[in-house]
Image (cartoon, grey):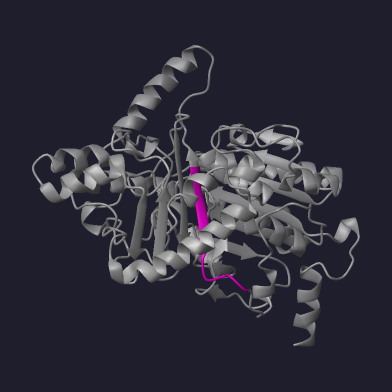
Amino acid sequence: MRRWLILLVCALGVLGASAAERFNLLLITADDLNGDSMGWMGSKLGATPNIDAFAQSCHRFAHHHVTVPICQPSRSAFMTGRVPHRNGALGFHPINPDVPTLPDTLKNAGYFTAGINKLAHMKPDTRFPWEMRHDGSGKNPKLLGQQVAECLKAAADAKKPFFINANITDPHRPFPQSEQESARKGKGNKNKKAGKSEANDSVVKSFPASELVIPGMLEELPDIRKEIGQYFSGVNRFDQSFGEIIGALKTSGQMDNTVIVFLSDHGISAPFSKATLYRNGTWTPLLLRFPGMGKPSVNKTDFISSVDIMPSVLEILGVKAPEGMDGRSFVPLLKGQKQPNRDYVITHVNSVSSGKSFPSRCIRTHNFSYIWNAWPDGQTQYRVEAMNGLTFNALARAGESDPVLKERVQHWLFRTPEEFYDISKDPNERRNLINDAAAKKEIDRLKKILLAHMEKTNDPQLAKFKATLP
């Protein structure tokens, strides 16, 4: 017991350590991976053996939600510890040049920094000062493993602790074996003739349609089942990439001296998930492994926000955190302590990849979710990348003859200013209870907490939100 306590104190950065003894940091992300697609989060499909095995050695957080369920602003949030309107990246924009980031904080502390894939989503370069950059391996497991190995060797040659951000771009669209991917490969072959990179040709695993479980926010339709099968082929290729990354780390001899963090940037690219504040959009379970962490654990109680990652890992690394972060370290939870206000999480959407603005805010608890949408006017139609491919089109076609599905499509396209769901009875958030008199007390309570958050962070949507209050 005494030895375990000493290791824990060291890991939490309480004891001073020389540069040579400092822990490394490996931050691994997936792209568009739904929270329930991994075995360690309940999937029975067997698509993720590598990360499932790794998860057994980690602290696991079942109720982690990204601050923004959209690629670039999501990364900007967890790389700054700030909500989007305080880091400047409301959508696909660079963060403000005066906002500190995780890579520049660690580089200033003497770390070797390397970024792999998704580099265009972390801007400006002055705030993401990667000393080594790699790209083009997001859906190519073997190449990604090689690039991680190169970064590890460069850090060893520099005699510095490292921070490597390895971003896997599976299972982002286009899914393997899909018409979208075939079209992309066709363009890739043309680009090859023009001297550009060729589309990835990695072998992927297929999953029988009969074995698939359709996510609860989607419908049981043939084309949706077909596309979910393609998605899981991407999930499996993600898992191969994850295995290659961990394999490279083990080969380097640095596995036991490295803090490892894993999350997805948001949920699956499908309606009522990616780019929305519904549960599947923001829910991305979190893994954390670090030297001397003690017995692995599963936290099914506390809500963690992705803006909490930066202050937490800096505390574990023993590196002074910059001022101005909205997130807070969850390290006390790892020591068995309680933290206030861990019974809810607040999430944001502003503008999407097209540049169009669809401002929304959500406060989510274990039993309820309240979503406020600033944009619905009965005419503006929602349009995001998640509507590409088979799933939304299948839903829209089915809605032409099914009034229930037609209403579902209309809600997706036009939304309502306020939404309230009883998750304990309606986990897939299908029945909006905003006008239910029995729900008014809870709705008012959640709106009060959301208001305080918006006031504290000087949210640009604050004045419009106040107009909804009594």
Compared across the picture, whether 114 is left or right of 18 comes to left
Closer to the camera, 155 or 468? 468
The spot of residue 127 in percent (x, y) is 74, 37
The spot of residue 130 in percent (x, y) is 74, 37
Residue 342 lies in the magenta-colored region: yes
The spot of residue 227 in percent (x, y) is 28, 43
Q: Is residue 40 visible?
A: no
Which part of the image, by quadrant, shows the N terminus? Answer: bottom right
Q: In the image, what residue occupies the spot 39% across and 26% down?
A: 184
In the image, residue 186 sits, relative to residue 40, either above or below, namely above
Q: Residue furthest front?
A: 470
Q: Residue furthest top?
A: 194
Closer to the camera, 441 or 200? 441
Residue 443 lies in the magenta-colored region: no
Q: Is residue 187 visible?
A: yes
Closer to the camera, 168 or 458? 458
Closer to the camera, 111 or 71? 71
In the image, residue 428 sits, relative to residue 272, either above or below, namely below
Res. 326 image quadrant: bottom right
Q: In the image, what residue occupies the spot 37% across and 61% down?
A: 46
Q: Residue furthest left?
A: 401
Q: In the image, what residue occupies the spot 59% across and 44% down?
A: 84
Compared across the picture, whether 13 is left or right of 16 comes to left
Which part of the image, by quadrant, shows the C terminus? Answer: bottom left
The spot of residue 94 in percent (x, y) is 64, 33
Compared across the picture, whether 310 is left or right of 84 comes to right
Q: Which residues are magenta?
A: 340-349
Res. 329 image quadrant: bottom right
Compared across the picture, whether 467 is left or right of 433 comes to right
